[in-house]
Image (cartoon, coloured by chain):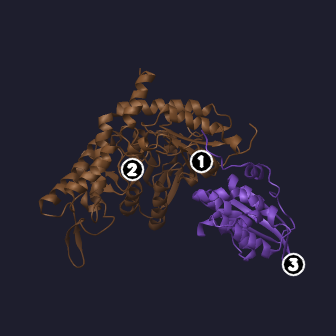
Chain colours: A brown, B purple
Amino acid sequence: MITPEQRKADDERIRRDFPLLMKYPGVAYLDNSATTQKPQCVLDAVERYYQADNANPLRGLYALSVQATEDYEDAREKVRKFIGAEHHEEIVFTRNASESLNLLAYSGSELFLQPGAEILITIMEHHSNLLPWQFAAKRRGAVLRYLECRPDGSITDEMLRAALTPRTKIVSMTQISNVFGRLNDIRTFAKTAHENGSIFICDGAQSVPHVPVNVKDLDVDFMAFSGHKMLAEMGIGVLYGKKELLEKMPPFLSGGEMIEYVKRDSATFAELPHKFEAGTVNASGAVSLGVAIDYYNRIGFDTILEREEHLSEYAYQRLTEIPHLHLLGAADGSDHHGIFTFTIDGAHPHDIAAILDSHRVDVRAGHHCAQPLMKFMGTPSTTRASLSFYNTEEEIDRLAESLSGVRSELGYAD
Amino acid sequence: MPTKSFYNEILTDHNLYPTHKHDLPDANEELEGINPSCGDDITLKLKVVDGVIEDGAYVGDGCAISQASADIMLDMIIGKTTEEARHLSELFLRMIKGKVTPEEMDELEEAGALQDISHMPARVKCAVLGWHTMEGILDGKGESVSTENQ
């Protein structure tokens, strides 16, 4: 059991690692599902890379380029271990989860989608795991279908089974919804999809930063996530894919670094993972992600989980006390994973966010890049507070107090 | 702890108790205005006779700023000529950009309550939605107007 004094000491110890949090002690940053702040070690690693190791990786035959290549490939190895992949070739660096999913929807759909095939996604998907499939379906003459969740955001294996058909070739699903914060039972769903002969893709953008993820244990065929949501720089993301599947897929982008031989009318492609990494890579971004992973390992997922679960339970308790506030998702703080999306009667989310901003509480308002879900839930837009392990109870108190005053600031009597 | 609230009484009153938020069966002009970023969606209805805005109303949904701004606008333009309404619109848009004289501020009456919006770039589109929609009607735009293309 962690005493309140210990927790406060941990708060201070962790927050000291984040220069931006120290710079703005009066700001409660609660938009971590959009992007996280960066620890000093990540910022230092980027600076050190450019001061000491920078050259174009993977091509030069001189010592600096070799060093840059090593930095880049070391980062890939750290990612591989972090998500429990078997081979380093299975880790493709991209710009972000969106690009990873686009890569799949382009290259994968050529392989997996024939005319008449079905793609099944859930209604809770972020636009980045929705639009690439909408476009792929149009290109390939396939059909995009939606698995609708229950009103509380949950999906069961029975619901998935009922939605699968013999034509379902691809199932793509988020592990943690950026609106509900619920953890989907990916291991079970992947097994069910595989029994149906479907490829299973997992959007890990909200899960990889917050829960330990092991792609072998989950047995997903592909997983996409972003570095900037897990303490690294913007502009670096990951696509994990099973080697035998990535090998069969055609390249996505073409250009430098992704070829073996180029003739006037044809080319042979480089080995994995370089086949999917055309052009000069984002080496400093990869380095920052590697160092962010080192930081996760140093703090430890035990500590991160304990802190985020504690904060989630606390936030759930505080928010559900507020009159006129309606929380989306689980009726249980432990299945929110730091994500609290809500409405307040009579208050537009953009007004809520503006009022919170005047109290220096940073939250997201709008459709959260999930318009079909908002329509399905019957609400045009919502407000979302999302936590990270560096947040504190005091920040949640400020969120709750500011929210309690929203209606009166908007002129309501109660 | 809180800094000065942007949501002053003029704004909250017009949002919670709008005078002009209703249907207008004898309107001869109407246009939908959409602000995709906030999801504000109003339909402005005007009765224009011989260059005079004899009556006006709006229906729709949106944030407090968009709704209050549309209601205040209608307070100001009903009974005015279309030329006068255009002039007020030009003043309002200039106020939002922070470029009006004190005399011009007086002319804007209650719409001046939205002056501070110039410090909130993300909300400017909410404040101007009603005014842009009115201009759309006066310009004879047939389809809906969106703040995205401003």
For image coordinates 73% across by 67% down, the residue present is: B104
Q: Inspect the image, locate mark 2, and give the three-letter code of the amino acid beneath it.
A: His
In the rendered image, the quadrant that contains the C terminus of chain B is: bottom right
Q: Which disc is residue B50 wearing?
A: 3
Q: Is residue A351 left or right of residue A171?
A: right
- The CA distance from mark 2 to mark 1 is 23 Å
Q: Is residue A281 left or right of residue A155?
A: left
Q: Inspect the image, locate mark 3, and give the three-letter code of the amino acid beneath it.
A: Asp
Q: Is residue A120 above or below residue B80?
A: above
- The CA distance from mark 2 to mark 3 is 59 Å
Q: Secondary structure at mark 2?
A: helix
Q: Secondary structure at mark 3?
A: loop
Q: Secondary structure at mark 1?
A: helix
Disc 2 and disc 1 on one polypeptide chain: yes
Quadrant position of residue B96: bottom right
Judging by the rendered image, the residue that carries numbered circle 2 is: A228
For image coordinates 59% across by 70% down, the residue present is: B149
Q: Is residue A112 left or right of residue B124?
A: left
Judging by the rendered image, the residue that carries numbered circle 1 is: A353
Quadrant position of residue B112: bottom right
Q: In terms of depth relative to the viewer, which is nearer, A19 or A325? A: A19
Note whether residue A259 is visible: yes
Residue A235 in percent (x, y) is at 36, 56
Q: Is residue A264 above or below residue A198?
A: below
